[in-house]
Amino acid sequence: MSEPPHLADLRALVGQPGSRGRIPTPAAVLDLDAFERNVAKMQARADAARLALRPHAKSHKCAALARIQLDAGAVGVCCAKLAEAEALAAAGIRRILVTSPIVGEAPARRAARLAAELEDFRIVLDHVDGPAELGSAAAAPIGVLIDVDVGLGRTGVSNVEQAIEVARAIAAQPNLKLIGVQGYGGHWQHMEGANARASAVAGGMARLSAVVSALRDAGHTIGVVTGGGTGSFEADAAQGVLNEVQPGSYAFMDRQYRDALKADPDGAFEQALAIAATVISTNHPRWVTVDAGLKAFATDAGPPIPLGLDGAEYGFFGDEHGRLTRPGGRDLARGDRIDFVPPHVDPTLDRYEVIHLVRGDVLVDVARIEARGASQ
């Protein structure tokens, strides 16, 4: 099957001076220089704290960007779902942790296939029935972590007793190996104020530590203690409980993190990702219309922020369109290009088939988002 015309035309722009301004919009545009600086900064922070860095690929779902993170020193990547892991594995990513528990025989068979194919595949479980499902499908050893609820209440064993039961069930399966635990506090990531985040993380890490101690006292080897995210890195490192961290959004940043982290150390990353849009109508005296609407941005974290247009405010104007109030001191003309800070990077990027990689005003590459929509 031949490539769609819009992608063929796009690839013809690669390397041409000024090609960034000719990318069809709306488009996910990544400042590759800023992205690489963000990746290097987080790797340096992790190295200084003696933490293994396993970036969460749910932020980008893109093998090309995962490879940059791995080449910079990451020990592997995280994937939220099996389908995400399958897509990145097919694109050549060989070290993957699936951070959501699975249920049932069919997902267990898929996980077993990945374990047989990959250099390093690992997955979390949080229920006593999970090991039997996964173990019955496994033809080769699979590394398993016990997911621990550190206060979010979404997944994970909720107490020490449940953790011990799951560990026993894992030990009963010849092809499963308990290698560690996971404790992710998603509810901490966007708390305003470093002190508030640190206090919340301390409580959650106490719960995780209790589980780790109990498992080790029961004779289980717990080598990996993984979790954390962009907003909690500083507090995670200070607690000294985790030995592996899973941040994702640091490489891109978005409005949600900008609003929460401000000048805190966890927010000291560049805005590398923008959603580019074009002004398509200027007929109204108070606003212009851009070609990026509900389909262009995730809407769970408020509207996007227009870059370089102080005083202009964006409003959703339907599936395909956005309304942008006219900023003071600058006229906006039909055909003007506007970059927006996305509200929430992960579900925003899931709307796009490719990421446009730019350096300055030049489009240098077009990277497929292989795991777009891979939520099964």
Image: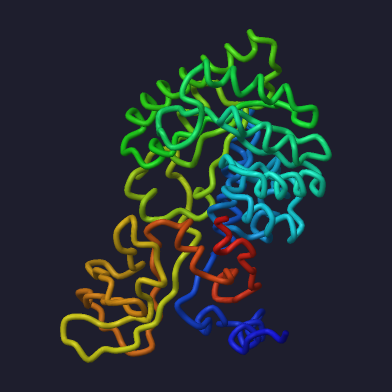
In the picture, residue 19 is in which quadrant? Answer: bottom right
- How many circles with numbers are drawn on the protein? 0
Report the colour scheme: rainbow
Depth check: 258 or 206 in front? 206
In the picture, residue 345 is in which quadrant? Answer: bottom left
| Quarter of the rendering occupied by the N terminus | bottom right
Seen at 40% across and 72% down, the residue is 295
| Quarter of the rendering occupied by the C terminus | bottom right
Depth check: 145 or 350 in front? 145
Depth check: 143 or 327 in front? 143
Residue 112 as seen in the image, left or right of residue 58:
right
In the picture, residue 5 is in which quadrant? Answer: bottom right
Depth check: 129 or 40 in front? 129
Residue 362 as seen in the image, left or right of residue 86:
left
Residue 134 % position (x, y): 70, 38
Seen at 22% across and 78% down, the residue is 326
Residue 141 % position (x, y): 80, 34
Residue 263 % position (x, y): 36, 42
Seen at 30% across and 70% down, the residue is 309
Question: Where 244 sits versus 247, above or below?
Answer: above
Q: Which residue reaches farthest left?
A: 285
Residue 204 % position (x, y): 43, 24
Q: Which residue reaches farthest top?
A: 217
Seen at 60% across and 69% down, the residue is 357
